[in-house]
Image: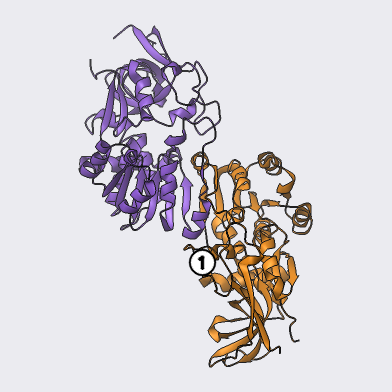
Chain colours: A orange, B purple
């Protein structure tokens, strides 16, 4: 075990796009596990778009970080030392932990990960928060019916790629929107989406959507907001459902973003637009994760991970989310298990 | 009976705000009632904001009028001559009829109005389409619960004034938004709204709303759209419901109106925004009208009408809707019953 522990703090609040100066890397001693605590060595770290919101000095659903606070997020790690009855050295665990090589946390903050069930990194992706977000947002908010045309923006991301496949399993015609030809191929060739639009290759999203969804849109799972969402709203069918999951196109905007007013569309279509947070479904997480796991093992649900190596590169991995550099779940690999 | 029949046609499609040139008044002979038909003499004519949509050359939920087409809308009239078994001379009827002194229509296009139940003009207002729009939009879409704060824009209009009172009957704290001190007094002194905001007296809708709805907004019944709606979206509580009924602030805009993007708000609040059309609830109209009638007779539901005299002044009455000149339901009185 190393005797130095690296850890990232919020150096300053970003204005607009975060950059490397947003983050400060400090070194300290590896903490000791106190009574009831567990010392965890980080193996994988998750970076997620919602973290941008916590960097802002504004109340939101996720409490804002103070300048100087440690950054936190989903982590999969290995127990080094345990003073808690539920865990022992060598166990793989997950929790919402600091961006650090090592953390000492109370046992109740951790959940076990079964390394025999699926690769442990999936606890941060398809079998973790992003997978469950897709599961509940699609099934409970977007409500896909067989034969529906379902559009998913951010289709190649950690959440969108799962959301689209769940719609496909429900007998829908699935159209993904993503930002490169590589992603478009991933969606149509690997994940079985019926169509995918490369938004980076056109300015005319409405025409692209007319071609990809000629019968209109019955359900829309929105991860991005902005002009892509405007175009989808122009194609909503009667009784359409819109699940608002994220608005990554707007997260780095300091001034209030503006766009065409679309509420009138909802009158004609009687469409429903609804935001959701996966945390509201917490009492049902266990069954969701079990079903997602069954689908993954059965080959119905595929996933990809983009892995950046080294804790020191976590800021770069996070910043890449806003450039669309990841295909599937963006992870940071911090250490190898059992080393 | 007069031997001349005045009738309004759509003279041309308005660009932006309609004006008197939008309308053409022609004269013709009074039609005769053919087999199965009923000759109806117009007593009251309804002008409604949704008619602006029919003047546009664009598919919407209401089919567009062609240039030269007769204008149509809700009418209460008196049967002059009937070749249909369900009606006889002297009966009061309602239907979606031409803006004219007389019309000959098939009997199945008419519904009877009971003049002993309520003033016959209410069949176009509180006991007609506007009342039912308020009823279904509030109860089925905005879903007010006791103790909720409910905001109604266009609060002093035909729909809004009923919607707010239904929320009040459901034990809610009701805040109306309207465009004059007279309307504010009408809402708070006559209709029992808890608060009313005069939007014409301030540019700072957000502050006005913070004061009128200090605990935030649980349900919003939107008749207007635009900046008032933006302000309400900034005050939505968790699990808020927004019923999108109309967007009168935008109906005369030729270019696509823009405004702040608000979908992000829906994530934090898990709010639901849903458009509706009263026509979707048609199978339940009878019971809705019965309940509205009971509330009116019991004094729980009050209404006001703004009556413009003379068919020739129907365009002026219609144009006044967009200037907020009406309090309650705007009607045109065309003739006196039994004269």
Mark 1: give few (<14), some (14-19) or many (20+) Cα within 10 Å. few
The image position of residue B321, as x and y in percent, is 36, 29
Q: Measured from the top left, where is residue A158 in percent x and y?
A: 67, 63
Q: Is residue B149 above or below residue B198?
A: below
Residue A11: x %, y % from top left? 59, 70
Q: Quadrant of the N terminus of chain B?
A: top left
Q: Is residue B138 left or right of residue A215?
A: left
Task: Give B11 or B333, whichever is nearer the viewer.
Answer: B11
Q: Which residue is mark 1?
A: A62
Instruction: Examine the rendered structure and indicate whether residue A127 appears above or below residue A34.
Output: above
- Residue B263 visible in the shown view: yes
Figure quadrant of residue B236: bottom left
Taking the image as drawn, is residue B141 in sight? no
Can you say which quadrant of the picture contains the C terminus of chain B?
A: top left
Q: Position of residue A26 (x, y in %)?
A: 63, 78
Q: Is the residue B218 above or below the residue B10 in the image? A: below
């Amino acid at each position: 075990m190393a005797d130095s522990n690296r850890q990232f703090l919020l150096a300053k609040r970003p204005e607009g796009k975060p950059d490397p100066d947003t983050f400060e890397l400090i070194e300290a001693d590896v903490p000791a596990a106190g009574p009831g605590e567990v010392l965890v060595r980080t193996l994988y770290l998750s970076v997620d778009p919602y973290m941008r919101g916590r960097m802002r000095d504004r109340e939101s659903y996720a409490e804002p970080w103070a300048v100087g606070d440690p950054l936190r997020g989903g982590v999969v790690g290995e127990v080094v030392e345990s003073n808690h009855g539920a865990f022992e050295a060598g166990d793989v665990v997950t929790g919402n932990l600091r961006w650090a090589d090592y953390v000492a946390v109370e046992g109740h903050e951790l959940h076990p990960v079964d390394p025999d069930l699926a690769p442990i990194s999936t606890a941060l992706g398809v079998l973790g928060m992003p997978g469950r977000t897709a599961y509940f947002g699609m099934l409970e908010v977007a409500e896909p019916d067989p034969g529906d045309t379902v559009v998913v923006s951010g289709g190649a991301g950690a959440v969108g790629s799962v959301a689209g496949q769940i719609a496909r399993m429900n007998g829908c015609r699935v159209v993904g929107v993503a930002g490169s030809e590589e992603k478009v191929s991933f969606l149509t060739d690997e994940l079985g989406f019926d169509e995918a639009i490369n938004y980076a290759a056109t300015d005319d999203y409405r025409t692209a959507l007319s071609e990809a969804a000629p019968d209109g849109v019955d359900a829309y799972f929105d991860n991005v907001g902005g002009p892509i969402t405007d175009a989808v709203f122009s194609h909503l069918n009667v009784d359409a459902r819109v699940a608002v999951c994220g608005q990554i196109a707007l997260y780095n905007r300091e001034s209030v973003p503006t766009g065409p007013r679309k509420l009138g569309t909802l009158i004609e279509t009687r469409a429903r637009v609804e935001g959701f947070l996966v945390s509201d479904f917490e009492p049902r997480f266990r069954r969701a994760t079990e079903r997602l796991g069954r689908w993954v093992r059965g080959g119905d649900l595929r996933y990809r991970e983009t892995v950046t190596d080294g804790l020191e590169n976590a800021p770069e991995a996070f910043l890449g989310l806003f450039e669309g550099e990841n295909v599937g779940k963006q992870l940071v690999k911090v250490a190898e298990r059992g080393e």
